[in-house]
Amino acid sequence: MSEQPPAPASKRVTPRNLVVAAAIVLAIQALALGITNLNLPLYQTIVDTTGPSYAPAGTSPVGSAFNAILLVAFAFVLTVMLVWLLKRRMVLSFKVLIFGSVAFSAYILTMVTADVFAVDYLPPALELPFAFGVPAVLVAVLAYIIFVKNNILLGTVVLAFVGAEVGSFFAETLSPWTALALPIAFAVYDVYAVFKGPLKSLIGTNPNIALVGMSIKAGEFTLGLGDVVFYTLLPSLAFSQFYAKFGILPALLTILAIEVGMVITLFLLSKRRLLPGLPIPMLLGVLVIVRYLV
């Protein structure tokens, strides 16, 4: 989901604003590549031992498509629940649900990343304090943002980091076909959710509450946390799958494709105030990766 603040669109969609937004997303994608590079040996070992982290329908192309559809269905149900809570003014319950879903992923993934970093770069005595302390601080900051005060800059930094971690995790632990099917399925769902589905109702009900803990600011634009996840998933997938054979070039080309798609999407905000942030970037990014798969 990409959104523009309630001001004249012609004054907001400028070359400078587009460059700022692209630079912020580029920084998040670079962070995701760093996390992917750091965690890749561990996650490869886990996947080789236990299999992909999510594959209820298997890892074939057809099974992967079904895997993606199941996750889209889960996202739909979750969004409907959030709309229901907001419409009944159950704000605290809404915030608890948002916090619980984001904080769980943030704590687990940050603990893994912090532990790997500590093992590689810190003295042994600091491993456990660092591995448990960093995710605890992150979750505490997230709780402050959601329940106490929505500091936009702090929220953007924390949620960008969480989004990069989730995108990297999916890229490293899903089967390649599921990792490709997922952004395609969510890009299709994004169109429905923004224009007709529950996401439009969620934002329209109370945007000041609905966007807290679920979005980041990229300059003048607002990007959904899901956008951040998928903007980082595909470059991380290209890195993890092709680095050994082609180096970092596939990841860089995937980033370029997504950046171009994102800028096109943001430019189109001069015509509308709300647009799905996934379809164009995901189409271009997937095409780059498919080029290396065939």
Image (cartoon, rainbow, N blue to C red):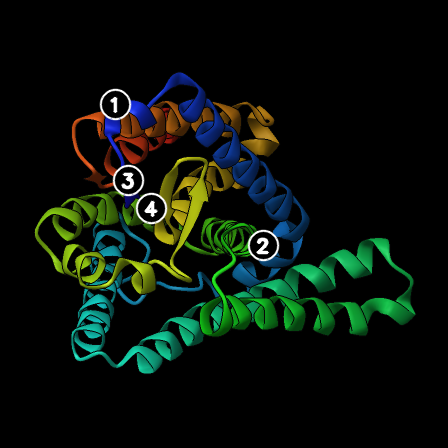
Pointer 3 with pointer 4, Cβ within 8 A: no
Q: Residue furthest left?
A: 196
Question: Does residue 78 appear left or right of residue 222 in this picture?
Answer: left
- Residue 277, given in percent of the width and then of the height, sits at 28, 39
- Residue 148, given in percent of the width and then of the height, sits at 50, 73
Pointer 2 with pointer 1, Cβ within 8 A: no
- The residue wearing badge 3 is 278
In front: mark 1 or mark 4? 1
Q: State the SS at label 2.
A: helix
- The residue wearing badge 4 is 177
Q: Amino acid at mark 3?
A: Leu
- The residue wearing badge 2 is 44
Residues under labels 2 and 1: Cα distance? 47 Å
Q: State the SS at label 4.
A: helix
- Of mark 3 and mark 1, the one earlier in the sequence is 1
- Of mark 3 and mark 4, the one earlier in the sequence is 4
- The residue wearing badge 1 is 10
Q: Amino acid at mark 2?
A: Gln
Q: State the SS at label 1.
A: helix
Q: Quadrant of residue 12?
A: top left
Q: Amino acid at mark 1?
A: Ser
- Residue 221, given in percent of the width and then of the height, sits at 37, 38
Q: Quadrant of residue 233?
A: top left
In the figure, 41 relative to 90: above or below? above
Q: Amino acid at mark 4?
A: Trp
- Of mark 2 and mark 4, the one earlier in the sequence is 2
Residue 272 visible in image: yes
Q: Residue at x 52, y 29 (%)?
A: 23
Residues under labels 3 and 4: Cα distance? 18 Å
Foreground: 148 or 34? 148
